[in-house]
Amino acid sequence: MAYVSAARSGALHVLAARWQGFAQWWLSGLKEVIPPAWLDWADGEAIPKVTIWHDDETVVCRLTSATGTVEARLPSAGFDVTTLATWLAAQGLSREEVIIGPVISRHLFFLRELAVPKAALGALAKILDQEVVRRTPFQLSDIWHAASVVPGGTNDIVAMCHWIIRKDRAEQALAELGLKSSEVDFLAAGEANGDATAVINFRPAGNEDPPWAARAVRLLAVTALVAALSGLSAFEWSQASVATTIETALAEARQGAQNGHDGIDPAGRLLAMKSEVSVLEVWDELSRILPDHTFLTESRMADGKMTLSGFSADAARLVRIIDQSPLFSGAALTAAITPDATEHKDRFSISFKIRGGRMTRPVAGAGSAPR
């Protein structure tokens, strides 16, 4: 059972990662088609920030957003991320729509002053790592650290404060608030005047999507779900319609097999079908009986009758020849026989019936003679 649970957890993790990648790709495309003025206005919406700190026997939660500041004092006993999520829901927000940072006492941080050339700001992360390794007694795996800009720089130099805190001290401070490092987005340092400054970000600001992006992704998810359900419903409906049609046809076929169709029993209908003359049989018979000096220019078959037009050296004999065939009857000229100076033959047009034949579809043709 433990293996199954682990497998499901891994599958859900992979699915969530793929969905996040797809959502980011979709957001990138959406930003490309939104007019720049609209995008600037939307991106200007500040991401709500929640700071949390201890005050006597309570935990103070301060929500700062574009609409103002809301503060609440909640009992410290039993406070955790679930309690925080419940309070956020009362403010009309979800955990994903805000960034959360606990306020940690300033004396828990180790501070260093740095002067970084502006040209080197692109490699600031590597510079800070090297400062830790070469100029402090800490190991990178044991700390969290970041730098913030302070007044005092020049045109080419940026004055910065390097904030360093040991992970065990930070985790202890978070535990006192009922939180874990995986549940917060940044660490804030408490100032002497009671304010707090975000000093270490666990989620880089450049990677944070504005609130409208989170709402757009949720809308995408809902739309995709509705589209999938609608597609499944339409597919089921179409399949049900096809199944109903097939069942109706089968029922009619069974009824026809039991009672016959149009008053003819199945055996009689089968014999009738076998007695019908095929087009191939008609042409085979014409090829056998027509003389070699005869060729056709047009032929038509419909409702058990056939009409032939063409040229022959002895057109007058064709009526008797066709009547003598066991397959044909009632041969007669449908137009006068006329000599043709070009072909040096007689032009004729003959109509006759096909014995036992029942041509349900007209068949027309023109060109070479059967023989």
Image (cartoon, grey):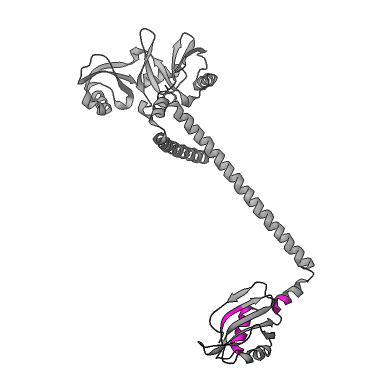
Quadrant that contains the N terminus: top right
User: Quick check: 72 left or right of 124?
Assistant: right
Q: How many marks?
A: 0
Judge whether residue 273 is colored magenta: yes
Q: Position of residue 264 (x, y in %)?
A: 78, 71
Image position, residue 306 (x, y; %): 65, 80
Q: Residue at x 78, y 66 (%)?
A: 258
Residue 73, position in %: x, y?
A: 50, 11
In-front residue for pair 273/242: 273
Instruction: Please tell me which residue is depicted at 58% across the width and 42% down the height of the picture.
Output: 230
Is residue 323 shown left or right of residue 103?
right
* Image position of 148 with respect to 227: above or below: above
Task: Magenta stretch: give its range.
Answer: 271-299
User: Which picture quadrant has residue 14?
Assistant: top left
Q: Can residue 327 be seen here?
A: no
Q: Is residue 311 left or right of residue 192?
A: right
Closer-to-camera residue (89/293): 293
Confirm whether residue 120 shows in the render. Answer: yes
Please provide percent x and percent y for residue 116. Answer: 22, 22
Whether the magenta-drawn stretch holds residue 153 is answered as no
Would you say 114 lies left or right of 102 here? left
Toward the viewer: 12 or 193?
A: 193
